[in-house]
Image (tube, rainbow, N blue to C red):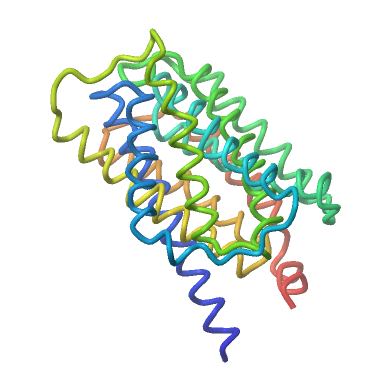
Amino acid sequence: MVLAEGKTRALAALWAAVLLWASSFIVLKIAFQRFDPMVVIFGRMFVASICFLLVFKNLRKIDYQPGDWKLLAFMGICEPGLYFVFEAMALTYTDASQAGMICALLPLMVAVAARLTLKEPLKWRTVAGFCLAIVGAVILSSVAEPTATASNPTLGNFLEFLAMVCACGYMISLKKLTPRYSPWFLTMVQAFVGSAFYFPLLFLPTTELPTAFDFTGVAAILYLGVFVSLGAYGMYNYGMSKIPTAQASAFINLIPVITLGMGLVLLGERLNWMQYAASALVIAGVYVSQGSRAEKSASTD
């Protein structure tokens, strides 16, 4: 009974995390229209760090082992570090709905990476699904046409793919660390590393510092810092610590569909019929990679 309740809480946390992550694409797109991307990303990390400082005393119980700092630093540099650099650049060139669709590749990338680094089994369905989803992502980008909200979707989608590579590195390192560290401690490390990573970028010649107060932009940064950088990552890290990596990463599959719907309703984004077909191909590839219901049941018994 306790195990069932623990899994239910983990699944609920993962659902909440992907809903918040999907909304982040929309909020980032709005924030980038008001402030420089580096200002937005540093702001969200700084807000999350301030929140963690308030509860730091409750997160100090850890089982540190020699050399863990390398894995902790790698996790933080992958995400939020380089991940948000690529995502910020991506969303200046492509629509939030297209960027969200590229996220569908992440669970498959994690499965391949887990096979290479953690020696986890990799089924032929996963490989086939991965190839199918890659084809869909390539078509999605190649048939995209420049619009007022997506000046160079091909470049933007490629940058979002690089962000997924960084996210993959984060998930693999996170899974190695969860046996010794609480999910909230790891989320705090991400916030602190992210703040330190982005602070120097504020002083680059290409970064435009804000010259006036913009309520919508500030509200977007607060939302990203509290609800996404702290809430979504904390809940996802909690969920991943309680169930297998493959099951937790599969929840990322929900982000493209949710983001597509939000992009249509909130931003008025529209895809052409070829892009919808390519999106369906990506989702089909993800579905194929998950295997049959019987295989799923066997793997979780």
Query: Residue 144 at x, y = what percent?
Result: 48, 20
User: Residue drawn 49% across and 30% down?
Assistant: 197
Query: Residue 224 at x, y = what percent?
Result: 33, 43
Q: Nearer the viewer, residue 192 or 20?
A: 192
Q: Quadrant of the N terminus?
A: bottom right
Q: Nearer the viewer, residue 299 or 268?
A: 299
User: Residue drawn 28% across and 31% down?
Assistant: 31
Compared across the picture, whether 200 is left or right of 77 comes to left
User: Residue drawn 51% across and 77% down?
Assistant: 8
Label tally: 0
Residue 129, compared with residue 92, is above or below; it is: below
Query: Residue 293 at x, y = what percent?
Result: 69, 68
Compared across the picture, whether 148 is left or right of 246 comes to left
Quarter of image, res 251: bottom right
User: Residue drawn 58% across and 45% down?
Assistant: 283
Residue 263, compared with residue 160, is above or below; it is: below
* Furthest-top residue in this view: 205
Quarter of image, res 96: top left
Query: Residue 83 at x, y = what percent?
Result: 54, 33
